[in-house]
Image: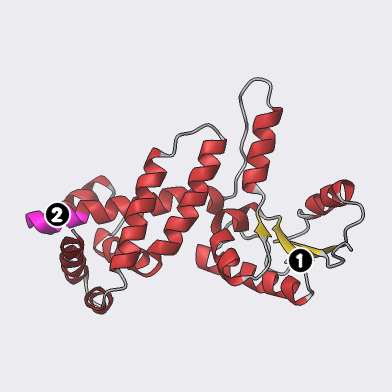
Amino acid sequence: MSDARPIGVFDSGIGGLTVVKALRDLLPNENVSYLGDTARVPYGNKSSETVERYSLELASMLAAENAKVIVVACNTVSSVSIPKLRANVKVPVVGVIEPGAQAAIATTRNRHVGVIGTRATIEKWQIKGIEALTLECFLAAARAGVVDEVAASMKNNYPGLDWTKMVPYNLERMASHGERRAAEMEESADTLRELGVEPVMTMATVKRQRDMGQIGKQQSVRGALEKDGPAMLGAISAAARDRH
């Protein structure tokens, strides 16, 4: 006997209806439940935390309707929230980035694939990589006793950024969310591989984010996150030494 429960599909708006049409063409005997968050569209200009919260709300609504699988028809959610959804939803969750990449590779005749992405989808890789590089740079600076000098040099090179605020902010994000961010970057690495790009920097970011997420669980580090940059660097540096 076939499973009569519906396939749940959600998007930030109505664009996901194209996915619904494709599902109905491919699986005409399946029931499909669609949820479009037109009240809060677009998602591409919102923070990762907001996108995760919205996507969990939508997935929970579809799960409450007894969906047997949830298809995320939103590229932004697919790039940001899949690990969180799979960890919190009891039915399988499928995104659209990897299947789309696979279809593009199978279809292209000249080995060229054009990619259109929202700001959140593309910036995610860069932001998490910048966080990892910031950590390495200022850990080295702290051990060499030149944090102020490095911060001043960075300010000269990037006068629009306040590194006295950026460093502790980036460290706190990694300490609090590093393991989740590592999982997100692993999915990004899979996407890059599907597109024929070796994810060298992405995989290095995975390791640094995951290590920092584990270090961030230590009480000495958690307590330092409420303090200034030098205190945070000192606690993180000590915890990192203890791990090796």
Expressed as whole percent of the image width and height from the top left, the position of residue 146 reads 10, 55
Q: Nearer the viewer, residue 180 or 57?
A: 180
Question: Splitting the image into 4 quarters, where does residue 13 fall?
Answer: bottom right
**Label placed on residue 184:** none
Furthest residue toward left: 145
Q: Earlier in the sequence, mark 1 or mark 2?
A: 1
Which residue: 28% across, 59% down? Answer: 162
Which residue: 24% across, 73% down? Answer: 221
Furthest residue toward front: 1
Q: Main secondary structure of the magenta part?
A: helix
The three-letter amino acid code for the residue at tag 1 is Lys
The colour scheme is secondary structure
Cα distance in 3D space between marks 1 and 2: 51 Å
- On the image, numbered disc 1 is attached to which residue? 68
Question: Splitting the image into 4 quarters, where does residue 120 fall?
Answer: bottom right
- The residues colored magenta run 138-145
- On the image, numbered disc 2 is attached to which residue? 141
Number of dots carrying numbers: 2
Which residue: 83% across, 65% down? Answer: 6
Expressed as whole percent of the image width and height from the top left, the position of residue 109 reads 68, 21
